[in-house]
Image (cartoon, rainbow, N blue to C red):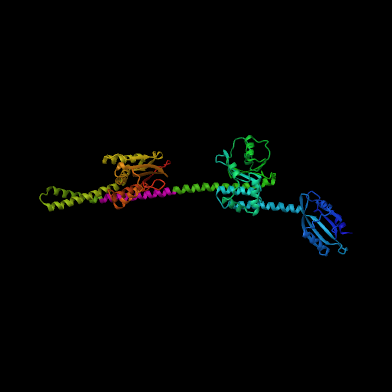
C-alpha cells in the first residue's frame, strides 16, 4: 500500500487540513492526497495545489528543504504564501520517496493558519493586558489628576492596548448636575493619524515612554480634540440618556445608531463626529465620577464585544485611580486645615505666654514703682521745701536743686512704667481699625494744634475689626506716629493708608513726599535714640503690638517701598 493511500484512508474531517504529494526533479507534483477540512473556512490547500507553480521556489528556505530531501536528508520548513489578497501559512515536510532512487521525493504540506490566527489573537490579548498592567503601575506613581487622565487616554488609544482611534474623558461635578469635558487624545483627520502612527512606528514606545513624551510638551498632536472636549458641558437631566444608562447599569455600551436617542445625545454624537461610540462609566465607591468615550473615527473599525469588555474592565481601574486622587486632594485640604489650626494654637499659646510675661512684668513694675515712689516722695518733697526756704545760700540751693531735679527724673521714669503696669489692667474689646487710627490722630493733632494727616482706608479694610485695649492701642500708635511725624516734618505731612492683607489689618505710614528710605530712617532713629523716640517707649509700643499678634516693619516691594508697616490680626468671621 502506498503512503499516500494510507494517509487518505480513515482521514478525519476535523483535523488540520493537509496534503501528501510527490515531487520530481522538475518540480512536477503527482499522487496528490488531501485530508482535513478546517482551514480558515476556505480550502486553501486545494487552491494552492491547483496552481501549477504553487511552490514559492524563490524562497531559499523552501528550495533548500526540497534539495535536502533529494539528497536523502529529511527536512522541514515553515513558510507563508500569498494567494490573491490573502496570506496563508504552511508547514512543509520533505523526505526521500522509498524505492525511487532520488528521482522523486515525498512532501507533506499542512496548513497552520488557524495556529497563526490563535497566536496573533493570544499576542493581542497579552499586549492588551500588558498595557493595562503598565497603566495600573503608572496610576500608583502619581496623584496628579491630569496625569491620571492622560494615562487613561493613552491606554485606551494605544495601538498594542485597547487600540481605539480617539478617547475622551468627561468628569462630573460634585452635585452631579453636569459632565464637563476634561481631556482627549487622538487624531482629528486621517492625515494627522498617519503622522502620529508614523512617529510611533519609527521606535515602539512603552506607555511610560509615551507619557514622558506628552509630559515634555513636545507633542504637537491632540490640539483639536482637546479644544473640542473642553468646550462640551453635558447636563444630566432627569430624562434617560446613554451616559446615565451606562452608569446605572454599571457597564460599557456601544452607541452605533441614532434611534432611541434624544436630541442632546444626537447633538453630542454629531459634535464628536463618529457614527459609533463606546461609552464606559467611571464609578467610585459611592458616586458617579464621569465617563470614558472612545471611537474609531479614522479606521471605521467596528467596536467588537471584546473591545467593549476590555474598555469596561479598564474603566474600573481608572475609576479607582481617579477616586484615589480625589481622596488624596481631600486629605491634603484636611492636612492644610489642621496645619493652619495648629499654627493658630501655637500663635495663641505664644500670646498667652506674652500675656503672662507682661503680667509678671507689670507686677514687678508695680512693686518697684511702689517701693521707689514712697521714699522718692519724701526726698523730693523735702528738697523742694528746703529750696523754698533757702535764701542767700548758693551752695545749699545748688545741692537741693540737684536733688529735686534727680527726683523729678526718677518720677518721670516711674511714669513710663505706668505703660507696662496698665497692661495688667487692660480691657480687650472689638474695635474698627480705621476708627482707632482716626481717634489717635485727632488726639495728637489737638495737642499739637496741627492739621490731620491724610488717611486713606481701602474699601476691603473699612469693616476690619481687631481685638485690643483701646488705651494700649493709642499709646503704641502715638509713639510710632510721633517719631514718623518728626521724620516727615510734622503730623500734617504724614500719609496713612489702611489695607487688608492675609487676614491682617495693614497700616502704612510715610511722608507726604515720596521717600523710599522713610521706614529705614524711622528704624535708624529708633536704633540710635534720636528725636523724641526713647528706647523705653518704643519697647513698650512694640510689646503692646506683639502682645496682640501684630508686628512693626518695612513695607514689602509688592505693597510699596519706603512705607513703615504696622499690622494687627483681624477678627475672623467664625470668631
Image coords of residue 249 (percent x, y): 64, 41
- The residue furthest left is 392
Image coords of residue 375 (percent x, y): 20, 51
Quarter of the image with the C terminus is: top left
For the question of whether residue 432 can be seen, the reply is no
Image coords of residue 412 (percent x, y): 24, 48
Quarter of the image with the N terminus is: bottom right
Left/right of residue 299 with respect to residue 323 in the rendered view: right
State the predominant SS element of the stretch in magenta: helix
Left/right of residue 143 with respect to residue 96 in the rendered view: left
Region rendered in magenta? 342-368
Q: Nearer the viewer, residue 69 or 420?
A: 69
Left/right of residue 332 with respect to residue 454 in the rendered view: right
For the question of whether residue 91 can be seen, the reply is yes
Q: Nearer the viewer, residue 356 or 189?
A: 189
Image coords of residue 536 (percent x, y): 29, 50
Amino acid at each position: 500500500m502506498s503512503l499516500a493511500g494510507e494517509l487518505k484512508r480513515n482521514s478525519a474531517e476535523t483535523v488540520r487540513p493537509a496534503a501528501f504529494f510527490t515531487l520530481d526533479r522538475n518540480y512536477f507534483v503527482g499522487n496528490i492526497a488531501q485530508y482535513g477540512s478546517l482551514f480558515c473556512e476556505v480550502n486553501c490547500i486545494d487552491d494552492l495545489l491547483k496552481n501549477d507553480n504553487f511552490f514559492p521556489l524563490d524562497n531559499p528556505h523552501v528550495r533548500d528543504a526540497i534539495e535536502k530531501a533529494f539528497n536523502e536528508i529529511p527536512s522541514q520548513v515553515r513558510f507563508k504564501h500569498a494567494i490573491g489578497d490573502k496570506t496563508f501559512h504552511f508547514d512543509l515536510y520533505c523526505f526521500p520517496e522509498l524505492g525511487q532512487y532520488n528521482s522523486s521525493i515525498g512532501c507533506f504540506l499542512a496548513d497552520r493558519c488557524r495556529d497563526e490566527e490563535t497566536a496573533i489573537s493570544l499576542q493581542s490579548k497579552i499586549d492588551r493586558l500588558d498595557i493595562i498592567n503598565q497603566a495600573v503601575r503608572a496610576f500608583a506613581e502619581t496623584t496628579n489628576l491630569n496625569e491620571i487622565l492622560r494615562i487613561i487616554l493613552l491606554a485606551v488609544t494605544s495601538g498594542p492596548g485597547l487600540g481605539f482611534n480617539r478617547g475622551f474623558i468627561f468628569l462630573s461635578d460634585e452635585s452631579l448636575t453636569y459632565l464637563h469635558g476634561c481631556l482627549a487624545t487622538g487624531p482629528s483627520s486621517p492625515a494627522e493619524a498617519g503622522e502620529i502612527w508614523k512617529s510611533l512606528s519609527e521606535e515602539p514606545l512603552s506607555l511610560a515612554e509615551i507619557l514622558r513624551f506628552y509630559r515634555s510638551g513636545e507633542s504637537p498632536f491632540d490640539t483639536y480634540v482637546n479644544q473640542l472636549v473642553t468646550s462640551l458641558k453635558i447636563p444630566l437631566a432627569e430624562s434617560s440618556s446613554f451616559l446615565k444608562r451606562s452608569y446605572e447599569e454599571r457597564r460599557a455600551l456601544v452607541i452605533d445608531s441614532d434611534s432611541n436617542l434624544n436630541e442632546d445625545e444626537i447633538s453630542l454624537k454629531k459634535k464628536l463626529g463618529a457614527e459609533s461610540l463606546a461609552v464606559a462609566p467611571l464609578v467610585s465607591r459611592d458616586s458617579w465620577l464621569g465617563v470614558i468615550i472612545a471611537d474609531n473615527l479614522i479606521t471605521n473599525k467596528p467596536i467588537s464585544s471584546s473591545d467593549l469588555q476590555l474598555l469596561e474592565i479598564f474603566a474600573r481601574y481608572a475609576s479607582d485611580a481617579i477616586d484615589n486622587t480625589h481622596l488624596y486632594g481631600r486629605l491634603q485640604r484636611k492636612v492644610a486645615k489642621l496645619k493652619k489650626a495648629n499654627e493658630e494654637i501655637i500663635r495663641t499659646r505664644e500670646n498667652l505666654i506674652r500675656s503672662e510675661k507682661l503680667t509678671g512684668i507689670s507686677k514687678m513694675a508695680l512693686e518697684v514703682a511702689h517701693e521707689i515712689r514712697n521714699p522718692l516722695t519724701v526726698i523730693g518733697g523735702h528738697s523742694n521745701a528746703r529750696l523754698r526756704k533757702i535764701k542767700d545760700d548758693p551752695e545749699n540751693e545748688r545741692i537741693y536743686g540737684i536733688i529735686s531735679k534727680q527726683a523729678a527724673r526718677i518720677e518721670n521714669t516711674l511714669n513710663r512704667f505706668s505703660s507696662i503696669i496698665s497692661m495688667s489692667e487692660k480691657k480687650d474689646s472689638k474695635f474698627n481699625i480705621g476708627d482707632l487710627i482716626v481717634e489717635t490722630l485727632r488726639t495728637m493733632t489737638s495737642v499739637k494744634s496741627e492739621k490731620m494727616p491724610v488717611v486713606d482706608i481701602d474699601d476691603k479694610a473699612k469693616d476690619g475689626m481687631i481685638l485690643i485695649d483701646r488705651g494700649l492701642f493709642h499709646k503704641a500708635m502715638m509713639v510710632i506716629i510721633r517719631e514718623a511725624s518728626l521724620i516727615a516734618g510734622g503730623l500734617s505731612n504724614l500719609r496713612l493708608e489702611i489695607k487688608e492683607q492675609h487676614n491682617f489689618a495693614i497700616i502704612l505710614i510715610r511722608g507726604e513726599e515720596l521717600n523710599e528710605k522713610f521706614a529705614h530712617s524711622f528704624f535708624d532713629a529708633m536704633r540710635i535714640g534720636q528725636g523724641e523716640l526713647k528706647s523705653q517707649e518704643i519697647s513698650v509700643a512694640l510689646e503692646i503690638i506683639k502682645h496682640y499678634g501684630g508686628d512693626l516693619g518695612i513695607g514689602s516691594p509688592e505693597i510699596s517701598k519706603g512705607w513703615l508697616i504696622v499690622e494687627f490680626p483681624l477678627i475672623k468671621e467664625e470668631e
